[in-house]
């Protein structure tokens, strides 16, 4: 007889792998797609998911991780809202012998024994892609190119790295100037609010907007239109993620380009969880492959988009 037939149903149910996942929040279209991917793939993989939303607060993530430790889950995964301040709680997980997987965003700890693997995008490279696109687009421009930047959440890996990669490329030519740079916290509402302030201060001087995600760009597009300017024409707009909302904006002629950042990390995470439980060794870093979508290809690509 099979093992299943011999065991009472409760014993079998206990065999399910339990994964505790602490999510950043629900700040953007990207994040919503990421949450859906994780929930759906846990279900498909037969993994019991304990999901917790931190509403973009590190203290809530730390609380959630401690509660996963207390519940003795098999694996903990989380997307750290900011890079620093995780050592203590990660040591607690290690002491409890619970493996930790980082998804999407990384931590800046020196001790990489505190997590098994980090899976997600190369945010510096995304920033470089945005920069290279701009340098190419403005190659014949003789005058100054005044750029305003909407940064992501302060202290988060994507905000730090997307800024770094972009600056690394544009600094090769002094005509590129970042005249204002402020956080819009990765949300539409904040993106709009900060862009309004930029426009009030600098108005027609602004040639380019670089937004660290699509949601902030979409909020800013509203502000630009309300100021009587034409997005993607009067102001060139570059953003990151390539979510559906960005494709709609590109098709409408209001966004010039979006650098791809895939939120569909669920299937990869579930297979990592299974591998860990099976005692397999995982690479320390699993990088997502990505491209860039200028508005010219948006209509053709849109039907293929999964998020
Ligand atoms: O770009 C942004 C989200 O960490 C890659 O977080 C993620 C970023 C994404 O809020 O839209």
Image (spheres, grey):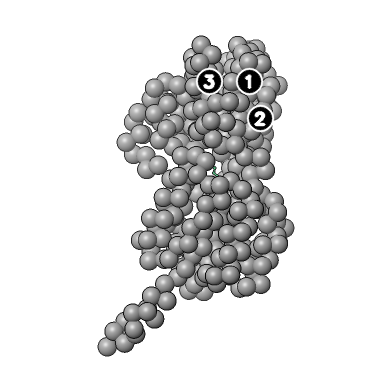
Quadrant showing the N terminus: bottom left
Query: Where is the C terminus found, in terms of image quarters?
Result: top left
The CA span between labels 1 and 3 is: 10 Å
Mark 3, other Cα within 10 Å: few <14 / some 14–19 / many ≥20: many
Q: How many marks?
A: 3
Q: Where is mark 2, residue-wise?
A: 182
Precedes in sequence: disc 1 or disc 2: 2
Label 1: which secondary element: helix
Foreground pick, 288 / 4: 4
Which residue occupies 54% across, 35% down? 187
Asked whether, in this view, residue 77 is left or right of residue 266, the answer is: right
Image coordinates of residue 73 in percent, x first then y, are 52, 69
- Label 3 – label 2 distance at C-alpha: 15 Å
Taking the spot 41% from the left edge, 55% from the top edge, the residue there is: 39
**Marker disc for residue 198:** 1
Q: Check residue 223 in the rendering and tell me which mark sits there, or answer none.
A: 3
Q: Which of 146 and 182 is in front in this view?
A: 182
Check disc 3 and report its element: helix, strand or loop.
Answer: helix
Q: Picture quarter containing residue 166? A: top right
Q: Which of marks 1 and 3 is nearer the N terminus?
A: 1
> For the residues marked 1 and 2, what is the alpha-carbon distance in whole angstroms?
9 Å
Residue at (50%, 22%) from the top-left corner?
Answer: 221
């Amino acid at each position: 007889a099979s093992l299943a037939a011999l065991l009472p149903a409760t014993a079998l149910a206990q065999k399910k792998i339990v994964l505790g996942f602490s999510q950043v929040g629900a700040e953007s279209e990207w994040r919503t797609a990421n949450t859906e991917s994780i929930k759906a793939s846990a279900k498909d993989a037969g993994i019991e998911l304990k999901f917790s939303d931190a509403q973009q607060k590190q203290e809530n993530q730390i609380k959630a991780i401690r509660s996963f430790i207390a519940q003795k889950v098999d694996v903990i995964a989380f997307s750290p809202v900011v890079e620093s301040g995780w050592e203590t709680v990660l040591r607690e997980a290690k002491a409890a012998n619970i493996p930790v997987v980082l998804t999407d965003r990384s931590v800046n700890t020196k001790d990489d024994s505190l997590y098994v693997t980090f899976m997600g995008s190369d945010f510096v490279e995304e920033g470089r892609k945005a920069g290279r696109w701009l340098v190419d687009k403005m190659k014949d421009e003789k005058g100054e190119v005044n750029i305003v930047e909407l940064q992501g959440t302060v202290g988060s890996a994507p905000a730090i790295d997307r800024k770094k990669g972009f600056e690394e490329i544009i600094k090769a030519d002094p005509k590129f100037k970042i005249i204002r740079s402020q956080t819009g916290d990765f949300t539409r509402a904040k993106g709009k609010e900060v862009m309004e302030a930029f426009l009030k201060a600098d108005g027609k001087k602004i040639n380019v907007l670089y937004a660290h995600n699509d949601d902030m760009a979409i909020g800013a597009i509203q502000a630009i239109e309300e100021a009587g300017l034409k997005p993607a024409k009067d102001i060139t707009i570059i953003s990151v993620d390539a979510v559906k909302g960005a494709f709609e904006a590109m098709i409408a002629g209001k966004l010039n380009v979006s650098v791809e950042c895939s939120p569909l990390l669920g299937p990869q995470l579930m297979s990592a969880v299974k591998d860990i439980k099976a005692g397999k060794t995982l690479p320390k870093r699993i990088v997502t492959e990505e491209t860039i979508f200028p508005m010219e290809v948006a209509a053709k690509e849109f039907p293929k988009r999964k998020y």
